[in-house]
Image: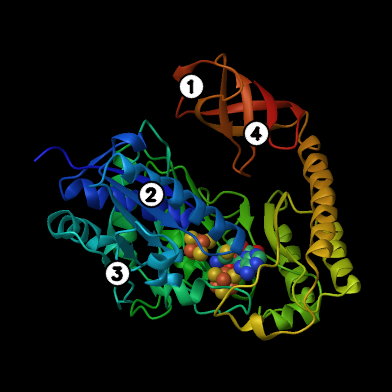
Amino acid sequence: MSKNIFYIRTFGCQMNVHDSEQLASIMVDAGFEQTDDVSQAQVILVNTCSIRDKVAQKIVSQIGRYRQLKENNPYLVIGVGGCLAQHWGTSLFKKNVGIDLVFGTHALDKAPEMIRRIQRKGGAIVDTAFHKAIPSLNICTLPKNGNLQTFVTIMQGCDNFCSYCVVPYLRGREQSRPSADIIDEIRVLVTHGVKEVTLLGQNVNSYGKGLAEGLRFSDLISKIDAIDGLERIRFTTSHPKDLTDDLINCFGKLGKLCEYIHLPFQAGSNSILARMNRGYTREDYLAKVVSLREACPDIAISSDAIVGFPGETTMDFESTLEMMERIRFDNLFSFKYSEREGTTAVNLSEKVPEKEKDRRLSLLQEIQDRHTLEMNKAMIGRTFGVLVEGISKNSSRDMMGRTRTNKIVNFRGTENLHGKTVSSLITAAYLHSLRGELS
Ligand code: SAH
Ligand code: SF4
Ligand code: F3S
């Protein structure tokens, strides 16, 4: 038989990006060969996301384009995995004639076997079952092309059930990995040149729930901080209600923990936060930000916000803007509320018209751009440690790296600096990056 070549396309969050890395590793172990050229593939795997309707529609169109490749290659197998597969299950077949396999968020490890079965016998397969233990959670993926950074999943699933969100239904209940497995994985990664790990989970700061170890997330980070050869630790995503003092106090104390946190606030009005089932008030959130900045004055804070949630009045929206002015986030990912089938917010009245959502989103983004630029400009004239990741996208004469606060710095330098932490004086600041010079 000729080579069994597969291609993976990923949509969605960092967890999905990491799932795709694990899926690729499972496929290679099972004897398949990966390609970056879709026209060469006998198997196309689309790892999907269902967080907002626009994302789902984009994925459906992309699958449609892949389906056309079957005209020249009738034996092509198209597999759709991940969150949208979990969400729509068998109905994906109806939406897209030409899909052969639908595999959910707990079925990555079974993909090769199912693909082989389809290649042998034809037909279509769906596996969207949930399992108590997800086998793919423990797969260590080694960095490619001299990458210094990797993701390490520490927990999966979400128990929070924010009223707008599909994730708890698609990823299942929270499951934490035993700390020994995580530590072993990071040790292996370090021996392969990794200097920075991002600990991943839908809600990393509730890590440890359900484990016999009795370990908190802050205890896990302290253990990871002791790993020789590792230089930087980041994590995502944190939920404000679970951001405890012991975790806040790790910032500025643990040498490897970067001064950066992504802490979604979603909305500034208490009545909207309650309707969202977020489990905290604006006052709680503001108090956490004060504590974070007391523990670590230089900490960078990024966040997520949703505009146009059902019942969001102009005054509610203004509370969101007011929170932004008070906190001044380093970065903000903002979204128009998107109604998702199966979530409880579907039943809420007082939907906000699409046009008004657009208006609110652009206003919010305008304010955030101003803040981001002002905060980046405040770094001019200061010197920061920059971990050099590679050649800059802007110019082959420049290298790029990141500060511990997760800001991109481009500077004149040569490739031998790759992997080193250099000291860089910031000389100019833009919206998405900084310019520096070696100092
Ligand atoms: N587990 C993470 C990430 C969830 S998804 C967390 O809780 O922070 C990332 C972001 O997508 C969320 O923070 C939220 O801002 C946004 N989001 C989720 N569902 C949405 C929806 N139905 N409409 C619009 N934005 C949504
Ligand atoms: Fe979704 Fe809320 Fe869970 Fe985040 S915490 S994944 S927003 S339900
Ligand atoms: Fe999307 Fe699933 Fe991540 S819905 S945001 S890929 S957890």
Q: Earlier in the sequence, mark 3 or mark 1?
A: 3
Q: Earlier in the sequence, mark 2 or mark 4?
A: 2
Q: State how far apart marks 2 and 1 are (Cα).
A: 44 Å
Q: Quadrant of residue 81?
A: bottom left
Q: State how far apart marks 3 and 1 are (Cα).
A: 48 Å
To which residue does mark 4 refer?
Answer: 384
Q: Earlier in the sequence, mark 4 or mark 1?
A: 4
Instruction: Name the residue at 41% across, 70% down.
Output: 86
Q: Residues within 10 Å of mark 1 (few under 14, many from 20)?
A: some
* Mark carried by residue 417: 1
Q: State how far apart marks 4 and 1 are (Cα).
A: 15 Å
Q: Is 254 located above or below residue 386 in the figure?
A: below
To which residue does mark 2 refer?
Answer: 67
To which residue does mark 3 refer?
Answer: 126
How far across and down, in percent of the image, does residue 310 sit? 76, 77
Q: State how far apart marks 4 and 3 are (Cα).
A: 50 Å
Instruction: Name the residue at 69% across, 37% down.
Output: 432
How far across and down, in percent of the image, does residue 127 sit? 29, 70
Disc 4 marks a residue whose amino acid type is Phe
Q: Quadrant of residue 349?
A: bottom right
Residues at marks 4 and 1 touching, judged by CB atoms closer than 8 Å: no
Q: Quadrant of the N terminus?
A: top left
Q: Earlier in the sequence, mark 3 or mark 2?
A: 2
* Mark carried by residue 233: none
Q: Earlier in the sequence, mark 2 or mark 1?
A: 2
